[in-house]
Image (cartoon, helix red, strand yellow):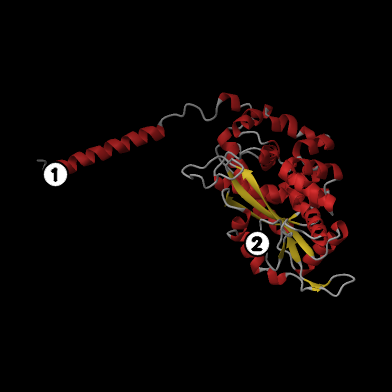
Amino acid sequence: MFSSSSSSGSEDEWNDLLDSSYNLYLNSPRSCWVHDLLTDYKNGEYFQTCIKLREYPEKFKEYFRMNIHTYDYILDNISNDIKKYSNFRECIQPDEKLAITIRYLSTGMSFRALEFLFKRHHYTIGKIVEDVCVAIWNQLFTKHMPIPNKENYLKISSTFEVLWNFPHVVGCLDGKHLRVKCPEKSGSMFFNYKGYYSIVLQGVADANYKFIFVDVGAYGKQSDSGTFLASDLYDILDKYKNSLPRPTKIKDTEIDMPYVMLADDAYPLKEYILKPYLKRQLTHEEMIFNYRLSRCRRCIECAFGIMCTKWRLLYKPIETKIEKAENIAKAITLLHNIIIDLDGSPNAMAIEEAMESFEFQKKKKSRNYKYFTKKS
């Protein structure tokens, strides 16, 4: 039996011992502030290559996937959000942070591989990528991915009619699986039917391959229809469907047609979503309609293909936590829009390369597409 006084005394002695041990740990000298290999960051890729690239605009575009003025435009808008201050050491400048992030997104290199290129610790690079992606989205999404109003929808519709000969279309809807590293204790929630772990990026694109809406983060195991109905994108489209122009007559007809978004047969049929006929016992007119709709709907597939071709990280698993992967995906979609706005629409070669790289060119789908194209 211990008395209360002896037990309280031993408890105080134990607390004092813990406090002294903790203070000793805090006051112990660090073995090193930074690894010797990383102290020579002036010989890293940013100082030796990135700065000099401004003298060669073509090489700059090859390296950063954008022109110099576009890069500077992004840097000017996010500098205040990513700039740090310290009284103890020199902070990494916003220009270098943006260069590291763009290089990561455009190549898909791991943080540890970038560590040896830029002479910055891989943990620091991971934090830089997260901060820059969040800053890009927060500062620029209202300028380059705003929610359209009726005037914007009418402009989009007229562009679709001119380029794709399909009236009253205000966007094309589809989804894409983005590879991710399997999260801990997630079971099969992120395991998709293609055989890898993913989150779903759903997007609506216009006739110029720009994204109008995006939604990121759905479980990979969900179907396209289930993902759409459970997404914020569905809530936004359902909420703002009254902002669509009122139905008007199609040219040279007396038919009042609503303004719609085009989707494939995996999506639900809504008053603002138009999908193809089922591929069973189609009449000649229905086959022509399906062909015209599929041809026009390629805008969203081309948008995904162009984005993946430019930002090669999307060809590989994003080896971060899911929350960070969502921020990275949103930043990439916004960078896609910014480059189109400032550098111009993709050329025919880029579109052709995107078409060849995108998943809808797989054998089964391409055979069906060629079959109905030939029939039409």
Q: Give the residue displayed 78% in from the left and 44% down from the top.
A: 355
Rendering coords of residue 168 (x, y %): 80, 66
Q: Is residue 118 left or right of residue 256?
A: left
Q: Quadrant of residue 13?
A: top left
The reply to whether dot 2 and dot 1 touch (C-beta < 8 Å) is no
Q: Is residue 154 left or right of residue 240?
A: right
Q: Which residue is mark 2?
A: 268
**Residue furthest left as drawn:** 1
| Residue placed most toward the observer, 328 or 268 | 268
Q: Residues within 10 Å of mark 2 (few under 14, many from 20)?
A: some
Give the residue type that dot 2 points to. Answer: Pro
Marks 2 and 1 sit apart, C-alpha to C-alpha, by: 74 Å
Name the mark on residue 5.
Answer: 1
Q: Quadrant of residue 21?
A: top left
> Is residue 331 in sight in this rendering?
yes
Find numbered disc 2 in the image and state the secondary structure of the residue it sits on.
loop
Rendering coords of residue 323 (x, y %): 56, 48
